[in-house]
Each structure stands twice: as structure tokens, then as C-alpha cells.
Image (spheres, rainbow, N blue to C red):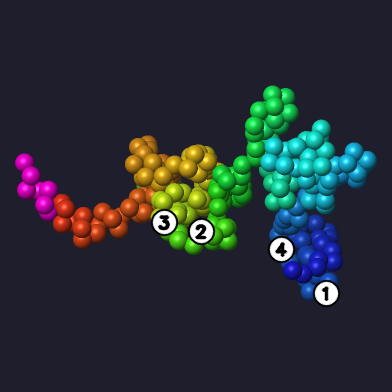
Amino acid sequence: GVKVARVEPMDPASRSGVVGVLADGTRIAGTHLLLAVGRAPRLGGLDLPAAGVQASPRGVAVRPDLRSVSSSRVWAVGDIADPEGIGPRAFTHVASHHAGIVVRSMLFRLPARVDYAALPRVTYTDPEIAQVGLTEAEARAAGHDDLRIHRWPLSENDRAIAEGRPEGVVKLVVARRTGRLLGADFLAPRAGEMDGLYGLMIGRKLPLSALATMILPYPTLSEAGKRAAGEHYAPRLLSPFTKRLIGWLKYLP
């Protein structure tokens, strides 16, 4: 929330290190500078008003099939597409998803619409941070108040221990009543590789039991997600009723 006036080398002679100078004169030193200011669509040269295409600084306003809301002969895809005012999603894999929507909608006149319910997001740090579906905060903001949050640390995962990288965690956001997965977060080496399975579950509305009962190869990092899913059913398995039921069943032949 502060304004950076300028950035300069820490040591002008060797040009090593950087110093950020804030508007009030405060100097912040560091070894590297990370630029994460985002991107803005370049629409000025297109003269969109002449074609009756509605747009904003966020991008071209489109319907779920990526057709312009104001000009039926125009579609927009990629970083400049703003479907239903929810804002562009500036990811290469989103642009690829848009391409499939446009091919079906524009060329074949088939019903197709953008669906971000299972959108994967990855930050390629080391370890990676990956997320798919709703975060816990997004789920609560969307009205999902009855949630269960399940975590499984990589310190309890044999593959992570064997590779000497036990720092990390898997977090699942689950609707308590339906047992449906709403979102998943990962902090782990190659966490982005884990997003696909959970995106499939969210997109196909599969119950969490599909993951909890799935046979996964051992040892793999993906087992951490299965263990987290198993935590959803642990209270039932350990409940007094279940224990009484097992006690009764032992008398059967």
C-alpha cells in the first residue's frame, strides 16, 4: 500500500543488490527485485466503440460463450476477455480453455461456456504453491458456511521424507453436508502437478470418497491428498455407533 518512487543499485560499482526508495524517503534494501504489478489489456488501437464492442480497462465484456455482450459478431479470448464482469484470468491454460470454447461456439454453433469452477493456479516458486477451485475464504464468501477443512503435512508423507523435503502441506476445502470437494491448496515440490486430479473432481462434482478410496502408487506426494481426504471420514469410523456395530458383527458367522 505504499508508493515506490524509484529503484536503484545498492552498489553502483558492482551493480549488485537493489534499493527501493519510497515516496517518503524510506530506503528498503534487498538482493533481488520481483516485479509483480500485473498486466493491462492494450485495447486503445482497436477503436472498439466504432464496432459497438463494450469494453473496460479490465478487458472486453463477453458472455460465458466468450461472445461480446454488445456485438454478436465479435468474440474475445485470453487475457483481454472479461466474462460476465468477473475479471480476466491471465493464465496460458485459461487462454487454451478459451480456444476450445470459441471453436465450439463460433465455428460449430454448439453450446459452450467458460467454467472457472475448477481453475488451477500455480505459483512457480520452490516449493511450488498450487490451488484449484475455491479457497477457504472464497468458499465462505460464496455462502458455503458449513465447511470442513482437512490438512495433511508433508512431514507425514514418506516420499517427501525420503527426498529430504518434508516442508509443505495439502489443504482440502470440503462441503460438510454433501462431502463434495470445493477447493484444494498445495505447498509442495512440483505442487502444480497435483492440481489436475483435484480439478477433475471439482469439475465433475465427484464426492470426496472417490479420492479417499482411490489406489495411488506408493510412495508419492499425491498420497498426502488422499490422507487428507481420509480425515473427512475418520469421525464416522471412530464413532461410538460404528464401534457398537463392529461389536455386533463379530458375532455373525
Q: In the rendered structure, which segment of residues is drawn in magenta?
A: 247-253
**Alpha carbon distance from label 4 to label 2:** 41 Å
Sequence order check, earlier mark of 4 and 2? 4
Position of residue 190 in the picture relative to residue 176 (left or right): right
Does 217 sit left or right of 65 as displayed? left
Marks 3 and 2 in Cβ contact (< 8 Å): no
Q: What is the C-alpha distance between the residues marked 1 and 3?
A: 51 Å
Q: Nearer the viewer, mark 1 or mark 3?
A: 3
Q: Quick one: 143 or 233, which is closer to the camera?
A: 143
Residue 251 is inside the magenta segment: yes
The residue labelled by disc 1 is: 25
> Mark 3 highlights which residue?
176
Amino acid type indicated by mark 3: Arg
Residue 243 shows in the view: yes
Under mark 4, the amino acid is: Gly
Q: Residue 30 has which mark? A: 4
Mark number displayed over residue 144? 2
